[in-house]
Amino acid sequence: MGTIVWFINADHGFLPALVAALKQASYTFLVAGLFIRFLEYQVKHIEDKRLAILVSVAVTSLLTILLVFGVHSLKGTPKPFYSTLATIILAPFGYLALAIRMRKKFEKDDIPDEKR
C-alpha cells in the first residue's frame, strides 16, 4: 500500500511522496493487525453467520478508511483522498475474505459456547 501511495503522490516531489508512503506503510504495519483481531472478535461473537460477516466487514472497513484518511489528512500528504482511495477499494474485499475464512474456521473448530 505504501508503494501505491508513493506513486499517487510522486508528482509532488520525492520527499512529499516518501512521507505519504511512510505514513501508509507505518499505519498498515502497526494498525492493520489490531483491526484484524477486531474483525475476528466480531466474527466469533455475533451468532448469525451472515450478520457476523456483514457487521465485521462494514465496521472494520469504515474504521480503516476513516483512520487512513485521517492519517493522510495530517500535514505531509499532498493528495489525502487519492491516497485513501486504494484503501476504500481494497479494504472491504480483504476484510470480507478474512471474515469468511475466520467464520468457517470458527464453525469447524466447534468452540464451546463459554469461549464464544
Image (tube, rainbow, N blue to C red):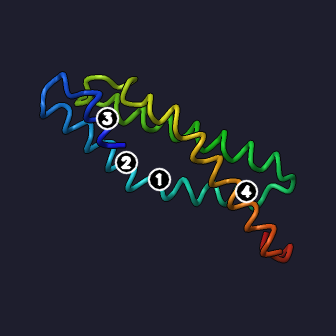
Q: Mark 3 Cα within 10 Å, few/some/many (few <14, many 20+)?
A: many
Q: Which residue is mark 1?
A: 32
Does 97 sit left or right of 70 as displayed?
right
Q: Position of residue 44 (x, y in %)?
A: 75, 62
Q: Measure the C-alpha gap from mark 2 to mark 4.
A: 23 Å
* Label 4 vs label 3, nearer the camera: 3
Q: Quadrant of the N terminus?
A: top left
Q: Which residue is mark 4?
A: 43
First in sequence: mark 2 vs mark 1: 2
First in sequence: mark 2 vs mark 4: 2
Q: Which residue is mark 2?
A: 27
Q: Measure the C-alpha gap from mark 4 to mark 3.
A: 30 Å
* Label 3 vs label 2, nearer the camera: 3
Q: Which residue is mark 3?
A: 5
Q: Measure the C-alpha gap from mark 3 to mark 2.
A: 12 Å
Q: Secondary structure at mark 1?
A: helix
Which of these two is toward me, 104 or 61? 104
Which of these two is toward me, 64 or 105? 105
Q: Residue at x 41, y 33 (%)?
A: 70
Q: Measure the C-alpha gap from mark 1 to mark 4.
A: 16 Å
